[in-house]
Image (spheres, rainbow, N blue to C red):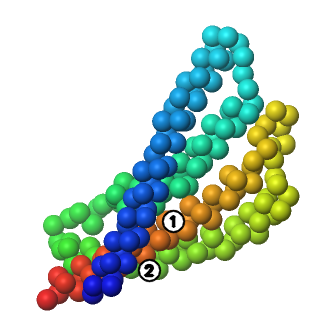
Amino acid sequence: MYWIKKTSQILHDFNEFTGRAVAWLVLLLVLLVSYDVTMRYLFNSGSIALQELEWHLFSFIFLLGAAYTFQHDGHVRLDLFYQSHFMSDRRRALVNIFGDLFLLIPFCLLIIISSWPFVSQAFIHAEASPDPGGLPWRWVLKGTIPLGFILLMLQGIADLLKNIVLFCEDRS
C-alpha cells in the first residue's frame, strides 16, 4: 500500500503545483479584460490580438485547471445519492473507483488520442489566427488540449489510487 499512497501523493502534488501556477493566469486575464474594456469604451480603441489573447488565456485556465478543480472536488457532481446517509465512505470510494476507471480515464485517453492529429498539424504548420491582427500562436493553444487531458488523467489516476487505499483500509 505504501507505493500506492506515495504515487498518489506525487501525482497530487504535481497537479497542486500546476493548478496554483495556472491560477495566476486568472489574475492576468482579469487585468487584461479590464484593460481591454477600458480601452474600448473610454478611448474607442480595440485590438483583435488582445481579444484573442483573452480567449486563449481562458482556454489555458479551463484546460490546464481542470485537474486542479477535480483534485479539490470543485467539479459539478450530481449528489443525489453520493452524499446521502446510506453511502458509507467505502461505497463512495467504490463509486469513485468505478468512475475513474471506466469513465474519466478512458475519456481522457480518447481525447488525448483523437486530438493528437489535430494538434500535430497545428504545430507542423505553425497555425496562426486567420484574422488580420490576430495572434500567431494558435498552435500553442491547440497544444494545451492533450496537455490538459493528460493532467486530468494523472489526477484521475491519483484519485483512483487514493480510493483503492480507502476502500481496502476501510474493509479491515
Asked if residue 78 lies left or right of residue 144, the reply is left
Q: Closest to the observer: 37 or 78?
A: 37
From the top left corner, tell me how far across and down residue 164 is, in percent: 30, 82
1 or 2: tag closer to the N-terminus: 2
From the top left corner, tell me how far across and down residue 52 is, in percent: 70, 37
From the top left corner, tell me how far across and down residue 92 is, in percent: 26, 73
Question: Which residue is painted at 58% across and 50% down in the image?
Answer: 60
Which of the numbered marks, if any, corresponds to residue 171?
Answer: none
Whether residue 130 appears in this view of the structure is: yes
Whether residue 75 appears in this view of the structure is: no
Question: Which residue is painted at 68% across and 33% down in the image?
Answer: 51
Question: Which residue is painted at 81% across and 47% down in the image?
Answer: 128
Residue extending furthest toward the top: 42
Label 2 Cα crowd, 10 Å radius (few <14 / some 14-19 / many 20+): some
Q: Closest to the observer: 108 or 3?
A: 3
Q: Quadrant of the C terminus?
A: bottom left
Q: Quadrant of residue 99?
A: bottom left
Which of the numbered marks, if any, corresponds to residue 151?
Answer: 1
Instruction: Give the amino acid type for the residue marked by disc 2 in the picture.
Output: Leu
Q: Mark 2 points at which residue?
A: 101
Tell us which disc is closer to us: 1 or 2.
1
Q: Is residue 28 above or below residue 137?
A: above
